Amino acid sequence: MDFLAGSDIKVVIAFWLGVGLVLMTVIMLSVILLKRETFLHRERVHAQAERFWRPILEGGGDLPASGIPTLSAAQLSGFLSVWNDLHEQLHGETTPHLSRVAQGAGLEDHLHRVLGGGDFPMRLVSIIALGHVKNGRSFDRVAPFIHDRSSIVSLCAARALMQIDQVRAVSMFVPQIVHRSDWSQGSIAAILREADDPAVSNELVRATLHATEDVAPRLIRFLANVSEEAVAPIIRKSLCSSTDERLISTCLQVMSRPAQLDCVRPLHTHPRWHVRMQAAVTLGRLGSAADEALLVPMLGDSQWWVRYRAAQALLSLPTVGRPGLHRIRDAQTDPYAHDIIVHVLAETALKDAA
């Protein structure tokens, strides 16, 4: 580098800047290539583990424990991919064969280790896998994750806890439903659908009875999916005594017992149009011949949606149907009532022709 000895200082600086830039480029390229190779290596190991463990996990129930290979840490990702996939096909249930393979392979020890310090994706699939294992000794290890800031992690933990021990988990799960506004409603409903213990509906009833008006409608929807019997008295109480329009609308949407219609019928003149609309829908879904007298005046309501739902409700009543709706149309003097019946009859004819 003798040529730099007599060069201008600007030339020297430019030269070394160029050298530094080349070195940085080489280093960055090397890091990228190394990360790519590491990723590809992990993918190959993952795929090999999937191919190795799938026939074992899908095999028959006569596999002896002594014949189950030991699961290595490198194989864990591929094993869990197959393990969780098979259990989702079983809707979260397990089989004696899968339990025997998990025990023989030493799965739980790997999962507990990952929970203590694995990366995010592995912690997530490990929590899911522990739910499928259904071993009570894993409950306390999974429990802290129900409070995780990540909604995905906390929901997966909630489901795993409910799979491991519903009776113990429900007292943790239901309060989180109340407080976690970031939880997906569909995910909560799916977890509750898998529950079959009376403790779940009992806990939901307690939470609903003490919930604020903002939270109660959401809990009533969940409770209605879990137990029609448990939600029935809450629906009756809400419809007969509550003034909260959102709560009333929710109860009208989820109620399924005609015996509760005595609390619905007075709502056909409710001051809020969306409550009148839901009342019409409910009368059409659960009502009897006597409800025709309530629905006909609603055909002249000031709100189009109320008129529309009232006409559809009349069409749904077994004692009215299409012939009865023609009769009601011909007796109308209110142009709004006449037009909405014509609209619903035409809509029905188009559906029949399609």
Image: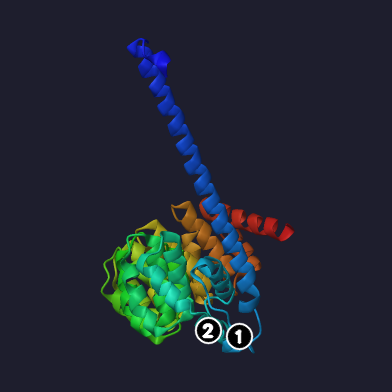
Secondary element type, mark 1: helix
* Residue 245, numbered label: none
> Which residue is rendered at x = 39% and y = 22% of the image?
16
Front position in the image: 59 or 44 = 44
Crowding at mark 1 (Cα within 10 Å: few <14, some 14-19, many 20+): few
> Which residue is rendered at x = 61% and y = 73% of the image?
53
Give the residue type that dot 1 points to: Gly
Q: In the figure, 23 relative to 276: above or below?
A: above
Give the residue type that dot 2 points to: Gly
> Which residue is rendered at x = 47% and y = 43% of the image?
31
Q: Do the numbered discs 1 and 2 sit on residues whose CB atoms are within 8 Å?
A: yes
Q: CA distance from mark 1 to mark 2?
A: 8 Å
The spot of residue 34 in percent (x, y) is: 51, 47
User: As drawn, is 225 to the left or to the right of 340?
Assistant: left
Q: Quadrant of the C terminus?
A: bottom right
Q: Is residue 139 visible?
A: yes
Q: Is residue 205 visible?
A: no
Quarter-wise, where is residue 8 in the image?
A: top left
Q: In the figure, 112 relative to 313: above or below?
A: below
Look at mark 1 in the image and give the residue it sits on. Answer: 67
> Which residue is rendered at x = 33% and y = 78% of the image?
140
Q: Residue furthest front?
A: 2
Look at mark 2 in the image and give the residue it sits on. Answer: 104
The spot of residue 157 in percent (x, y) is: 39, 70
Secondary element type, mark 2: helix
